[in-house]
Image (cartoon, rainbow, N blue to C red):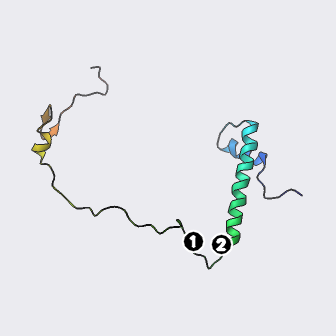
Amino acid sequence: MPDPTAITAEQVQHLADLARIALTPEEIEHLAVELGSIVDNVRKVTEVATPDVPATSHPIPLQNVYRPDVIGEILTNEQALSGAPDADDGRFRVSAILGEEQ
């Protein structure tokens, strides 16, 4: 007796049509098997997930790895522009590149 919850090639083709994805018959069969495996694995997890097991997004507790945002020594505007080939009004000056031939 076939599994009524199994992913069929027709379902894969229907989803591909909805997503406007062209699939070959071989790809459809391959995806039907792959998606069926995913559904089976999710089913196994839901069988063992009991109310006394808390939901987790990661098996190992994570902590923030960023350092505190502390202002350090920074360049003044004049120092930053001191090595620039061209500057104007406190900003770097570069040649335009959009819509013009150089």
Please report whichever mark, 2 or 1, sits nearer to the chain's N-terminal start: 2
Density class for disc 1 (Cα within 10 Å; few <14, some 14-19, many ≥20) is: few
Name the residue located 71 percent from the left edge and 64 percent from the top edge: 43
Q: Is residue 93 above or below residue 77?
A: above
Q: Secondary structure at mark 2?
A: loop
User: Which of the image's four quarters has the N terminus?
Assistant: bottom right
Name the residue located 37 percent from the left edge and 62 percent from the top edge: 65
Q: Which residue of the protein is positioned furthest toward the bottom in this rendering?
A: 52
As drawn, the label of residue 55 is 1
The residue type indicated by label 2 comes to Ala
As drawn, the label of residue 89 is none
Mark 2 lies on residue: 49
Q: Position of residue 78 (x, y in %)?
A: 10, 43
Q: Position of residue 49 (x, y in %)?
A: 65, 72
Q: Is residue 47 above or below residue 20?
A: below
The residue type indicated by label 1 comes to Ala
Q: Position of residue 20 (x, y in %)?
A: 65, 39
Distance between mark 2 and mark 1 Cα atoms? 8 Å
Q: Which residue of the protein is positioned furthest toward the right in this rendering?
A: 1
Q: Nearer the viewer, residue 44 or 18?
A: 44
Question: Are the residues at dot 2 and dot 1 in contact (C-beta closer than 8 Å)?
Answer: yes
Q: Nearer the viewer, residue 24 or 47?
A: 47
Could you say which quadrant of the image residue 100 lies in?
top left
Name the residue located 71 percent from the left edge and 46 percent from the top edge: 31
Q: Which residue of the protein is positioned furthest toward the top in this rendering?
A: 101
